[in-house]
């Protein structure tokens, strides 16, 4: 299994909505289970920075989405203070930011500079997405709402594409080609970027 494929699939399940009445047929908690399964395999195969933080943020994001999968809870949060909605989304966005930053490190170590740069820029996009509601809601600067939503969408699509494009790289936790225990040096060199 390529861990970034599981993470990408989980992100798609989280992002898509298929409503049947009040219920989502693609429940976000299922997406988080896939993301965390991918993270588990990833951390078993490579040394990943901020692993403990990723697990904490992933657990909070899963718990928040379990609560938000209950229709009455969604109604309550929509009627409540807008800052509560941001607080429920913050762990998921922070998880994505930390994951991007953590993946940039092994990419840079493997001399995959383009991949490292893209992961860092995506991490910055997610960081801005986490902080934007402070200005939009707290600072009452409504002019920033639309640009913040665009940055959020771009960061989500970017992370998905990066996971798909770089899933086969050894620095991204892809299994070695060939029989178990045999590493093909030529394949490793060709997969650095």
Image (spheres, rainbow, N blue to C red):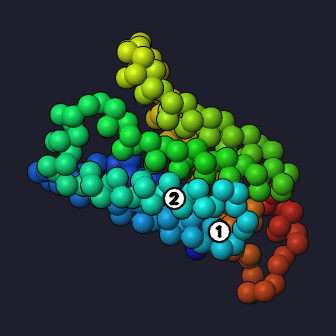
Whole-percent x and y of residue 24? 23, 54
Quadrant of the snapshot with the N terminus: bottom right
Q: Nearer the viewer, residue 26 or 145?
A: 145
* Location of residue 57 with respect to 30 vertically, above or below: above
| Residue 56 left/right relative to 105 | left
What residue is drawn where x is 23% and y is 40%? 77
Q: What number is the disc on residue 43?
A: 1
Callout in the foreground (2, 1): 2
What residue is drawn where x is 76% and y is 52%? 105
Whole-percent x and y of residue 191? 79, 60
Circle 2 is placed at which residue position? 56
| Residue 57 left/right relative to 84 | right
Whole-percent x and y of residue 108? 81, 50
Q: Is residue 89 visible?
A: yes
Within 10 angstroms of label 2, few (less than 14), some, or many (20 or more) residues? Answer: few
Q: Nearer the viewer, residue 152 or 165?
A: 152
């Amino acid at each position: 299994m390529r861990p970034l494929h599981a993470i990408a699939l989980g992100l798609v399940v989280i992002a898509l909505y298929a409503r049947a009445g009040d219920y989502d047929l693609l429940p976000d908690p299922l997406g988080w289970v896939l993301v965390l399964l991918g993270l588990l395999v990833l951390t078993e195969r490579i040394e990943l920075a901020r692993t403990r933080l990723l697990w904490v943020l992933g657990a909070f994001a899963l718990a928040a989405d379990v609560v938000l999968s209950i229709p009455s809870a969604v109604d309550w949060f929509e009627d409540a203070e807008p800052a509560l909605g941001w607080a429920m989304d913050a762990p998921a966005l922070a998880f994505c930011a930390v994951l991007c930053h953590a993946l940039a490190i092994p990419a840079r170590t493997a001399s995959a500079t383009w991949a490292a740069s893209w992961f860092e820029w995506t991490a910055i996009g997610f960081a801005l997405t986490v902080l934007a509601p402070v200005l939009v809601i707290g600072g009452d600067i409504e002019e920033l709402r639309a640009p913040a939503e665009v940055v959020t969408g771009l960061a989500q699509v970017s992370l998905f594409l990066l996971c798909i494009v770089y899933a086969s790289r050894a620095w991204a936790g892809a299994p070695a080609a060939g029989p178990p225990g045999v590493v093909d040096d030529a394949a490793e060199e060709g997969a650095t970027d």
